[in-house]
Image (cartoon, grey):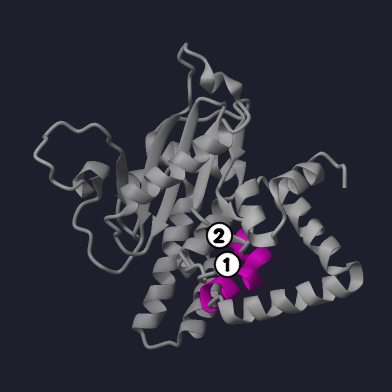
Amino acid sequence: MDKPKTTNTPKDSVFTFLFNDETKLRELYFALTGTKITKDVPIIINTLKDVLFMERINDISFEVNGQLIVLIEHQSTINKNMPLRMFLYAARLYEKIFSDDKNIYRASRITIPRPQFFVLYNGLAPMLEDEKILKLSESFADYGDNFIHLELEIKVININYGRNIDIVNKSKNLSDYSAFIAKIEEGKMEGLTKEDAFNEAIKYCVSNNILKEFLQTHSSEVFNMLTTTWDWDKYYEVRLEETREEGIKEGIKEGIKTLARNLLADGVSMQLIAKNTGLNEQELKKLQQGQE
């Protein structure tokens, strides 16, 4: 099996960690759209994860009262393939939402949540516009037919410090995040090492009430996110050791069954579990129904 590629930059990890909270998402959505989601309206965070490799597939996605799906990506480089990636994310989210819904087989139309897509840009390369639209159709091969049969649009918003002030200032957390990242980059430009720049930025922000509570509570996690690169070789080495240990304790077959049960509980498809465990679909169904 090929090693999965790390898709998130350090900034993305901190951004996702910061906003993985219903209250902050309501505030962030208000900043991006001008529309308030009141506290009585339920929010379900459904950010996709690769359960096998404990990696976030997308940055943030959430469902609002079954009527709206919002996907938000944070980028330190402007990626023109984001419409395609968002299209794939959205397809997986809808599949997850309707996986057990038999109504999709009815002849009458069913109502599905309306999607909204955002990319928040916070990189060093200049983005002249405060906002721009990326379209999926811009990636289509030219086949001589001007009619677009499929479209997806993403609003790209520049959240670098000092840009889009009207939007950023509607969310203190977004404003503080922008200032925090700017302070880190300022330290690097002054010649500080990456680690020293992060440490100085954290000290400055805490003393100036910028993400103060978040940084005081999670400073070590934030520092690790910003400075640590995930080592897949070490990850596989540790996982193999754990598998051997589990196999000795429970027996190889029982260890595999335990892993399969956990993956089923996390919503991983039977096909993917079968491929990675060697168990067949009948065995997996028995595990799912608690017969083994």
Reply yes or no: does residue 221 show up in magenta.
Answer: yes
| SS for dot 2 | loop
| Residue found 20% across the figure and 52% down from its top | 129
Residue type highlighted by circle 1: Val
Q: Quadrant of the N terminus?
A: bottom right
Reply yes or no: does residue 214 show up in magenta.
Answer: yes
Mark 2 and mark 1: Cα distance apart in space = 7 Å
Residue bearing the label numbered 1: 206
| Residue found 22% across the figure and 42% down from its top | 137
- Residue nearer the viewer, 68 or 253: 253
State which quadrant residue 273 falls in.
Answer: bottom right
Q: Is residue 188 left or right of residue 141?
A: right
Q: Is residue 167 left or right of residue 47?
A: left
Q: Is residue 58 left or right of residue 146?
A: right
Image spot of residue 41 (x, y percent) = 59, 26
Which region shows up in magenta? Answer: 210-228
Image spot of residue 190 (x, y percent) = 36, 85
Whichever of callouts 2 and 1 sits on the residue coming sooner in the sequence is: 1
- Residue nearer the viewer, 176 or 248: 248
Image spot of residue 237 (x, y percent) = 67, 81
Residue 35 higher or lower than 291, as above or below: above
